[in-house]
Amino acid sequence: MLPKLNFQDALSAYCAEAVALNILTPGSAASYRSYLNALDSANGQQTIAWIKGNVAESAELAEFIDNSNQTFRNFVRANPRAIASKNQSKLKSAFLSFSLYIFSFFNADADQLWGTPIDDFQLAQLIAKTAIFADLSVVNQVIAGKIGRQENIGRGNPYASWDCMSSIRNIKYKRHVNNGLYCDDNTRANHAIKRAVLQSMDWGKYADIAYFRGFEACHIYDLVQDPRFYTSVMNLVLVPRALAALTDHNSYVQAVLKRRVYELFKFTAAGPIPAVPKNYQNIIWR
């Protein structure tokens, strides 16, 4: 049922359903509520008006996501002091997720995320149809030390780490260097897979990663504290941002992705060969 398009009523319904569907944890939902309240205050209680306008102007999900991102960017540009720069990415993420919740009542594609929960196989198929991996030839070049971050060219790199084992994910200490490791907030991993995919498309190292608007880097093996695998282009996949959070909470999807990178790259993150998940042979990949 469509929630009342009163901001607080819609926000409460969004948080409750996101937790029920395992799209957000209770803690994340509380954070998103805080971010969205801050955004609504900063824009003069115009958040619902923004979303309604974008719903009216968008014929399909991809167009709605683009319009929502543009709405947020336009506000930040016009009101540079309204939102602290350190909070902009958090507010944008919360706004897009909340917007998709509202849009799901008008669009069948978005309803797959926010309507009746789809089963594990359907979710895995949805991700398989949209996931983007690096090409094997590019992975081999990274392993051989021929491409990657400039300071790593020429070094051996058996795990195809784009920055050659120099980073780990640690949001608390991001941008700090700890025991020689750069602490990151997923930025380097995001750049790594997008650069690798651009190489796969033969676009060259100077192509703009902004081409992948709406895609987010996801780790297939959750080894983000291990510098061998944090920016490994075998351990990363690009997934539409609207689906990315779901990959972290669904064991079947995780198993499917692990089997896929084994088939593509013989990659197992130094562990056992992953088993073939049930109905895996019926999944159609992009």
Image (spheres, rainbow, N blue to C red):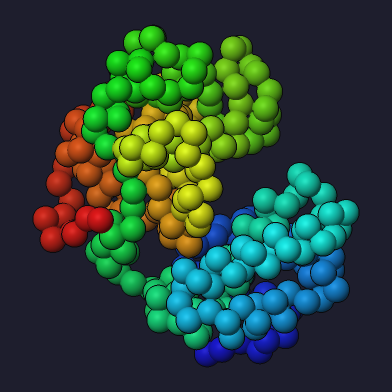
Foreground residue, 55 or 260? Answer: 55
Does residue 60 lie above or below 196 as drawn?
Answer: below
Q: Would residue 10 appear left or right of 204 to someone viewing this image?
A: right
The location of residue 234, given as percent across then percent down, is 32, 33
- Residue drawn at (34%, 72%) of the image: 118
Please identify the quarter of the rendering in which residue 79 is found.
Answer: bottom right
Whether residue 189 is visible here, answered yes or no, is: no
Please identify the quarter of the rendering in which residue 199 is found.
Answer: top left
Identify the residue at the far top of this view: 155
Foreground residue, 39 or 197? Answer: 197
Identify the residue at the far left of this view: 281
- Residue drawn at (50%, 43%) of the image: 209
Which quarter of the image is occupied by the C terminus? bottom left
Whether residue 269 is visible here, answered yes or no, is: yes
Does residue 30 lie above or below 40 as drawn?
Answer: above
Q: Would residue 180 appear left or right of 253 to someone viewing this image?
A: right
- Residue drawn at (53%, 48%) of the image: 210
